[in-house]
Image: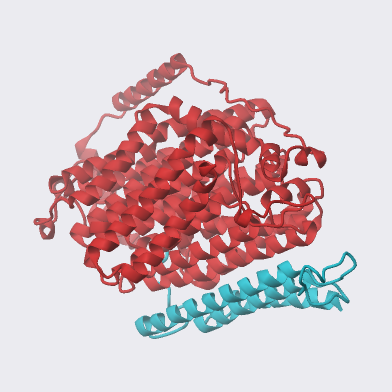
Amino acid sequence: MMMQHYPILAIMTYFLGAFLIVIFGKARAIRNAVGFLATAVPLCLLIMLVKPVMMNGEIIAYWMGGRVPAGGYAIGIALEVDALSLFFGLLIATAVFAAMLYSFSYMSHDDNEPQYYTLFLMLCGGVMGLVLSGDLFNMFIMVEILTFAAVALTAFRNTVFGALEAAFKYLVVGSIGSSCILAGTIMLYAQAHTLNFAQLSAMIPGNLNVATMVAYALLFIGFCTKAFLVPFHPLAADAHGAAPAPVSVLISGVLTKSGLYGIIRLTYILFRTMNLGSVQFWLVFLGSVSMFVCVTMALAQHDFKRLLAFHSISQIGYVLTAAGLATALGVSAGLYHAMNHTLFKGLLFLCAGAVLHETGTTDLDKLGGLSKKMPQTTVLFLVGAFSISGIPPFNGFASKWLIYQATYQKAVESGNIGFVLVTICCLVTSTLTLASFVKVTQSVFFGQLPKEYENVREVSFGMRLAMGLLALLCIVTGLFPGLVTSFLTEPAARAVFGANTYINAMMGAGYAEGFGLVDALPVSFLSVGVWSPISWLCLLMIMLLAVAIVAVSTKYDQVSALARTAAAEEAAAAAGPRYGSGSLAEGKYELFFGGEETVFSQVGGDDMFWGFKHNWRHYFSFMHNLHSGIVNDYSLWAVIALALAMLYAIIVL
Amino acid sequence: MILLNYMASFFLIVLGLYCIVCKYDLMKSVIGLSIMDYGVNLLIITIGFNPGGTAPIYTFGELKPESFFVDPIPQALTLTSIVIGACVTAMSLSLVIKLKEMYGTTDTHEIRRLRG
């Protein structure tokens, strides 16, 4: 049947496109045509697989060269596409397509364009090969391909501030991660004497010992490196800041997804350890820490793309938290958020790229007022910002809402109060996300327009088309959450919990049952529906009352406020300079709204939320010092994470 | 004998990691990466080794149930891994050259413009 060949064709189209561009890429028309086809064709192929795989629940097992398993042993290399693989494949193909459309005009001023498109398509092929593969060693090869391509693309504009440095750091820590994956793979091979995913997932869960647990920790840390989860997040920030905007889309929307896919595949299907409370705690803890640390790091940033990069990892934290709950609703919510993350983060990075393309900078302190010159980009950016902050009609709301429901439901089901704290952590992170996007919107698109940007124009049609495509998808997936969950995320979540189906599709019917494996968890997508409008209304009334009481009881007194300012100035002059760029002596931190001097000044990125940042200055300066930018420190974090994961795996499991 | 191999491979991996973490020079980081790669390669080869086995080169006629040979798959994996290791070294060295041109040093404590 023709359908069996679609996955391999999708992977090969990317690689074929890459090689064709090497040979014929000198002419722009040919290069763009090949690039367009090489990204459009896999997208179409994967969309054609939606009906059989997502709706009918088929699993496509493809043995390269027709080498089917003999005597219960997989001897060939396989591709296996279930709903989970296809879900991630579709995300990747969509993001890559939009990034390619954007690249045509965005990269047209760079030299070495053929090399750019070659690396771009190699990266796409690597990620696609990883998510569709059914072979552990093949996954390692694809990980290496995508790491190399990503490193090379990070350093592509090697004259940009910090590009080479970011690439080197990424290469060193990324290679440690890749070596971990290889070592984990080979340790599993030593135990089971196979590399096929289906066969491994039949053999490993019944034979958990120290060696397999160490392999588990190694593979887990390896995929964490690819997803840039918490000890590895500085790499993402560095890489995003230096890479061209379409590459940022690939790194945040596509590369991190490959890491997430690896973690989900590993924990749910290969080892089936998700029914253990310790593994759930591990994933939820890591996810919560990632989302909180990265969102606070983002608040302190002054660079547009670096800020977006930290937010990107923060959203990945959401996905991991939801996936770590080990409930069907949680996995479905996590996958929904993974999809939304690809869409809105891609959109935001492309908007940042548009700003960079027109103004030549991404420094938040220099930009301002661009909405007058780039109205369409502003609207598209707002769509992305609303989506990531979780404002109702957009897609971020739907998935975040499901995540809150899932974490709360987990707390109700397991009776563990810790999961309520996770819900609160998710809510706080979402609020801080909104806060920092208010900051970005204000300091880039609103406020005063600096003189040097008087001649800025709207970006070209091709770039707006790519951004519009992603914005449209953000709105559509937000308006019809029911369709998304029933056609995309719920089949994928069923695949996550249906490991036996996965094994049997590959190795023959009854193979998994022969190892005494059963799919333990019942799959239910019902949410508890923790939603009571009346209590929210009461809360609103109480808040309004509180504000009213405060407003009436402490009447604003101009004279005493000025007196307090004067006293504070004297105190500040005595104490010397304080945290932040401005000091108290300027009156900047005393009166936010009033005052002759501040009325006409731009409200910069630093001025907003200064009170919050001032109160948290110890935390922020601690984090700033921790992210030292020295490659040795980041490697040390990787080694510590690896050691902790191994210890945890051996002791607790 | 085989235990010595395992110990050597883990020693090489740890040595490589030590080199990456504790040596403040880009070149030494690259060397550390290579040493770690060699350690992993040695581990792979050791896992595929059967004491007393012959080389796994047979035609279908020669292959009998009693023939005893070392596992061929890890050897294939090692070849791939060696190629990838060479690529890592080449790419990181080219980055080191560019970094040296731009920053004028290979000290990792000097190359830290991106931080915080």
In terms of depth relative to the viewer, which is nearer, A5 or A402? A5
> Which residue is rendered at x = 48% and y = 52% of the image?
A9
Q: Name which quarter of the figure residue A380 lies in.
A: top left
Does the rendering let one see residue A301?
no
> Which residue is rendered at x = 52% and y = 46% of the image?
A317
Q: Is residue A510 left or right of residue A351?
A: right
Give the image location of residue B48, x and y in percent.
Answer: 78, 69
**Chain that is coloured cyan in the picture:** B
> Which residue is rendered at x = 34% and y = 26% of the image?
A547
In terms of depth relative to the viewer, which is nearer, A91 or A326? A91
Q: Name which quarter of the figure residue A24 lies in.
A: bottom left
Q: Is residue A147 above or below residue A134?
A: below
**The N terminus of chain A sits in image quarter:** top right
Q: Is residue A623 left or right of residue A285?
A: left
Give the image location of residue A467, x and y in percent.
Answer: 28, 46
In the rendered image of this protein, which colour is used for chain A? red
Q: In the displayed image of the protein, which residue is found farthest to the right?
A: B66
The coloring applied to the image is by chain
| Count of numbered labels shown in the rendering | 0
